[in-house]
Amino acid sequence: MENRPPVSEGSASICLMTALLAGCGGAEAPSSSTGRIATSAQPERTLTLTIDRVESAAPIPAYVHRNGLSFSLDAIFQSLDIALSIQAQAAVPDPNGGAAYSDAEIHAARDWFKKPPAGQGWHVQAILLPLAESEDLGLVFQDTRDGFVVFTEAAGTQASLLRTTAHELGHTLNLFHNDGDGDLACCLDAPTWALTGRSIMNQSRCLSADWEFAFSSTEKEHVTSHPEDRVKPGSSAFGECTLSHRKLC
């Protein structure tokens, strides 16, 4: 993992999380699998997602169609008992003129927009920029875990753009790449036979051709069963919840 606040979806350097800090409590979770589990009976939580973007970045699609079905960001997170309240703000001029952003410029972008309110409620800020010099698809700010960036022009397709947004939002809930249902060998060198990931939190480099807009049983178990301060955005740093997670990748 690079020694910087963001955790990037597109970079292989994320592999091998070393921050084995406070555990989540409870027994070991079952291994990730391609199986999906039904929505739990716990009360639904509302997460306010504020979306800020520069004019050169594409907006997040309201819906995409894949495998004959229609998907939206809020529908994807309903399976985690989370109701999204999406607040898309007016685009602002891009000071980079559409050029790729450096790490320093990405951090500076956080100061251009009003930050989510601290305290009560679940709040996350999404910042949409066109491209990163690192060629990542997106990243989460792991120091606060209350915001993320999506590089919209790197996504390539509307489906990939919606998936990247869901993936980075999953990181704000303290979900790891290794919570995905893909083969762990993909985290090391991405051999072709290991490209079996179908769920949201797999890195894009680990995805099978039939990937889904869905969370694996391990991903869902974390969000619905672990202590709130290990899930709620902004309540702890990224990585402070390693018990019950597969720790490679």
Image: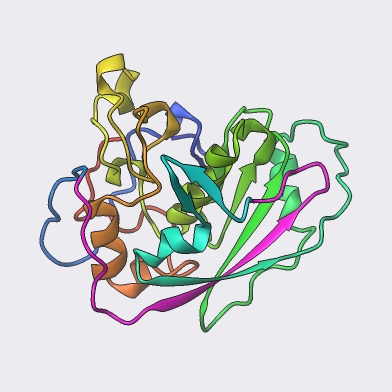
Q: Is residue 62 visible?
A: yes
Report whether 105 appears left or right of 226.
right
Residue at image point 45% right, 70% down: 235
Q: Which residue is depicted at the point 52% across and 84% down?
A: 120
The part of the chain drawn in magenta is 35-60
Q: Where residue 88 appears, x then y in whole percent?
A: 70, 64
Residue, x 75% and y 49% (percent of image)? Answer: 108
Displayed quadrant of residue 38: bottom left
Q: Is residue 44 magenta?
A: yes
Q: Answer with the quarter of the image where residue 1 lies.
A: top left
Q: Position of residue 182 (x, y in %)?
A: 27, 34
Q: Is residue 206 magenta?
A: no
Left or right placement of residue 158 versus residue 113 in this view: left
**Number of marks in picture:** 0
Indicate whether 240 appears above or below 16.
below
Q: Is residue 128 above or below residue 232?
A: above
Q: Position of residue 41 (x, y in %)?
A: 23, 78
